[in-house]
Amino acid sequence: MENTDEFQYYGANLMINEERSITVEKDTYETADINLAAYLRYIGYEILRITWKAKQAIFIFKNCGELRKSVILYDYYNRKTTVEPLRYMEILREIKSMLRNV
């Protein structure tokens, strides 16, 4: 059986196997950052589901293989993104409503 260590780097699921190579789960992207989740929704990524780990919501987005290769996360974490404030707040409210229904 293969021994793997799992960790997250900027929300990406990374696994290091016995050979110490890194694999990335390609079909989904997970983050616990509600503001990043709202931003990803704002730019068009779809939330596949929300799960809970130790009382913390984990937002799982689908079809995000290209997200890890793009500059979206880089720009977000380096404060180079812009949003229309009212639309962003509307999406944030929608996400918070989703959390109450999970």
Image (tube, helix red, strand yellow):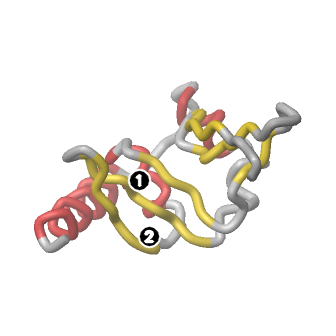
User: Does residue 60 appear to the left or right of 4 in the view shown?
Assistant: left
Q: Position of residue 20 (x, y in %)?
A: 83, 31
Q: Is residue 47 above or below residue 73?
A: below
For residue 47, which numbered disc appears in the image? 2
Q: Are marks 1 and 2 in contact (CB under 8 Å)?
A: yes
Q: Amino acid at mark 1?
A: Ala
In front of the other: 68 or 80: 68
Q: Residue at x 54, y 30 (%)?
A: 77
Q: Quadrant of residue 10?
A: top right
Which residue is at the far left? 100
Q: Residue furthest top?
A: 78
Residue 38, percent from left and from top: 37, 54
- Residue highlighted by disc 1: 37
Q: Percent position (x, y) of residue 59?
A: 40, 58
- At x 65% / y 63%, what residue is drawn? 64
Judge left or right: residue 40 versus residue 67.
Answer: left
**Crowding near pointer 2: few (<14 within 10 Å), some, many (20+)?**
some
Picture layout, residue 16 above or below residue 49: above
How many neighbours does mark 1 have within 10 angstroms: few (below 14), some (14-19), or many (20 or more)? many
- Distance between the alpha carbons at the discs numbered 1 and 2: 8 Å
Q: Quadrant of residue 21?
A: top right
Give x and y (percent) for residue 80. Answer: 57, 32
- Residue occupying the point 18% across, 60% down: 96
- Disc 2 residue type (three-letter): Ile
Question: Which residue is more in the foreground, 11 or 37?
Answer: 11
Question: Quick check: 43 left or right of 100?
Answer: right
- Quick check: 14 left or right of 96? right
Q: Secondary structure at mark 2?
A: strand
Q: In the image, what residue occupies the spot 51% across and 65% down?
A: 61
Q: Which mark sits nearer the N-terminus, 1 or 2?
A: 1
The C terminus - image quarter: bottom left
**Towards the viewer: 89 or 53:** 53
